[in-house]
Amino acid sequence: MYRKLEKLELEKEYSPSSCIEDIQVYIARYAERSAQALWWARETQSVLENLPYGSSDAEKLDLFVPHCDVTNSKTLYIYLHGGVWQELDKSVSGFAATNFQQHGDYFAVINYALLPDVNLAEIIEQNRRAIAYLYENASSFGFDPKRIVLIGSSGGAHIAAMMCATHWPKWRSDNDIKISLPKNLVKGVVAISGIYDIEPITNTDINDVLRLPEDQIAVYSPIRLKFKNNCPFVIAFGNNETSEFKRQSKEFAAHLEQQCIVNSVLEIESRNHFDVVLDLANVDSQLFKLSRGFEF
């Protein structure tokens, strides 16, 4: 039991598909729109594909660069996909790339290994390596390393939050990274429908794959951590989501406030856990506008 919720209730609360009829409809949209974005980027020679940021086969990323007929903002947006750390990949994660490219932005989609092939600790480490790689190579790619924003959905929002709980200078020294990394490497985060407290997850069937030891729950729960990289956050979720996902977002926002970290909370009407992120591809959406509203 967790917060007076029995296991069956928790299973429903932490299964976002319980609010919709067919999850595959949304996965198909991700795939179709990502394929369209990649096709256009290839046609316009505005994508660098399968850049290796680590030694494993999973550690690849695609970097979409600004279209040549727009003013280059020098800003890099890094998208961290969802899937409860065990589904999806970068091939279905580029659906918003064209929208950002057309506004002069860089847009990276990160591939990382999934549960149960690796554990949560390695997933976090891979994403740290990806971000450090992009920071290190900023000048060769053309974006400003002082203008890096993370966008994460669901499990990707958890990863994005963990990136800001990272002490980048210490992580750099522990991993023998040659370049120096600033404490505030990340300048903004858009966290969409995230999981910020792992404890309730460990009371569901997800833990059969997650297998997180009890003494690691706090270590990988952003809502229990002191943030080293204290950049501003946009915390968003759809109004058609479970009460637990909404609660987690609101309580995480309160946790950030206690640390004097600026954040805004956005509950988006007529959206669920899966289609809310598609607003990033809509130039008129509030989510897209807030994503590009960070000050550098």
Image (cartoon, grey):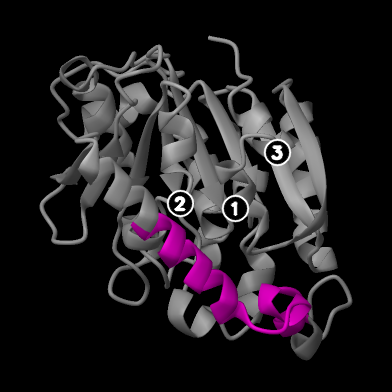
Q: Residues within 10 Å of mark 2 (few under 14, many from 20)?
A: many
Q: Residues within 10 Å of mark 1 (few under 14, many from 20)?
A: some
Residue at point 19%, 23% (across, down): 137
> What secondary structure is found at the residue carrying circle 3?
loop
In primary-sequence order, the first of circles 3 and 2 is 2
Image coordinates of residue 258 in percent, x first then y, are: 78, 28
Q: Is residue 78 above or below residue 113?
A: above
Residue type, numbered disc 2: Phe
Q: Which residue is mark 3?
A: 285
Which region of the structure is painted magenta? Answer: 10-35
Image coordinates of residue 296 in percent, x first then y, are: 53, 9
Residue at point 49%, 72% (across, down): 28
Q: Which residue is mark 1?
A: 278
Residue 125 visible, this orientation: no
Q: Is residue 17 magenta?
A: yes
Q: CA distance from mark 3 to mark 2?
A: 15 Å
Q: Are marks 3 and 2 in contact (CB under 8 Å)?
A: no
Image coordinates of residue 290 in percent, x first then y, are: 67, 28
Instruction: Quadrant for residue 111, please give it.
Output: bottom left
> What secondary structure is found at the residue carrying circle 1?
helix
Q: Which residue is mark 2?
A: 95
> What secondary structure is found at the residue carrying circle 2?
loop
Q: Residues within 10 Å of mark 3 (few under 14, many from 20)?
A: few
Q: Main secondary structure of the magenta part?
A: helix
In primary-sequence order, the first of circles 2 and 1 is 2
